[in-house]
Image (cartoon, rainbow, N blue to C red):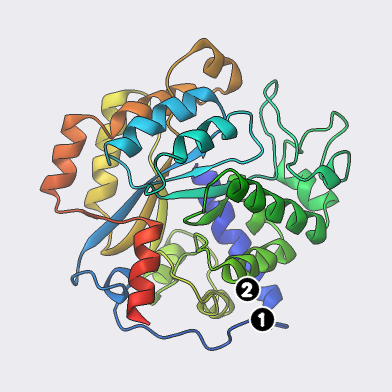
Amino acid sequence: MKTFLKLFIISFIYLSCETNKNNDNKNPNPIKLKGANWAEKLGYPKQSKVIILHADDIGMCSEANEAVIPYLLKDQIQSASVMVPCPWFNDFADWYKNNPDKDIGLHLTLTSEWKLYRWGPVSNELINSNLTDSEGYLWRRVEDVVSRVSVNDIEKEIRAQISRARQLGIEPGHIDTHMGTLYSKVEYAEMFFNIAMEYNIPANVIEFTPELVKKFKKQGYPITDQLVESASKYTLPKIDNMVPVPNADSYNKKKEHFYNLIRNLESGITEIYFHPSIESNGLKKITNSWQQRVWEAKMFSDPDVINFLNNEGILFTNWKEMMKRYKDQI
């Protein structure tokens, strides 16, 4: 999960350097909202820590669906994103029909990474195309996508996934990217941002404030002025930070790592993402990360964690609420 965040940042740096030469953003003058961070810009009190507890990889398997649905029904997490090409997407879409108030986004999926458990594209036009390997599945590695797949085919598949979700009754609250694929190549990222703005569906873009730039530089990331300029041209609401739930070698240590993460958060809106799944033999055959996922399936219904978040004075939001507040502000 840390690798994903690093890929997100480094790919964004590459994007900024390339696109600064030829940036024809559809809205070159984004609306300026007042506030030190996106929490303040959207009307939250100053110095508030506002978080989105966000579950990724929904629809990937039945175990993921079974883990996230109770969280959503009890409002113990605020948001989730579903993988449209995956075998258990239809199952989750069927549940969503009776729960349309929940904030569900699309985890736009262009890879199929597991050894034995695979899926192909949604677009019939792209079956047996450069988007798929010799077995007809999406490529396992991001590098294979980047080296083989045109931006036009990526765009076709993204639009097909959005269309398929809508056909089954899901109006996405946001869009993000599985394994960071859409940040791995400048043309992909440009298209991703443009689609977000065209559909008026926010993407998970970070606001690179001077404070955050300084922090990332201290951590060794080569943040540039071009990166900050590129990020400033995106016209929909952003988040101030994005971090994974930390891994650990025991459940109690995982909770402690999470507590430390919360204590050390800066004010603003932070998306904290994780991958919950219930334990099963099937899950263990799919992924070596099954133990972390199982712990994450019980962590946010744990009374200790709930009490901790309440005592810390955390405020919660989701992408639907962010968009509503954004529209109210403009």
- Compared to 91, does 240 lie above or below? below
Q: Residue furthest top?
A: 281
Residue located 14% across and 46% down the image: 310
* Residue density around tag 1, few if under 14, some if 14–19, many if 20 or more, within 10 Å: few
Residue located 53% across and 19% down the image: 283
Q: Indicate which disc residue 111 carries.
A: none
Q: Indicate which disc residue 16 carries.
A: 2
**Horizontal relation, residue 158 to residue 282: left or right:** right
Foreground pick, 233 / 221: 233
**Horizontal relation, residue 138 to residue 193: left or right:** right
Determine the secondary structure under disc 2: helix
**Horizontal relation, residue 311 to residue 235: left or right:** left
Determine the secondary structure under disc 1: loop
Foreground pick, 225 / 92: 92
Q: Residue furthest left?
A: 311
Q: Indicate which disc residue 20 carries.
A: 1
Could you tell me if the residues under marks 2 and 1 are in contact, i.e. CB atoms within 8 Å? yes
Residue located 58% across and 84% down the image: 27
Query: Can residue 248 be seen at all in this image of the molecule?
Result: no
Q: Quadrant of residue 168?
A: top right
Query: Can residue 165 be seen at all in this image of the molecule?
Result: yes
Q: Position of residue 97 (x, y in %)?
A: 46, 40
Q: Amino acid at mark 1?
A: Asn
Q: Amino acid at mark 2?
A: Ser
Foreground pick, 283 / 164: 164
Q: Quadrant of residue 325?
A: bottom left
Quadrant of the image for the C terminus? bottom left
Foreground pick, 137 / 245: 137
Q: Position of residue 149 (x, y in %)?
A: 82, 52
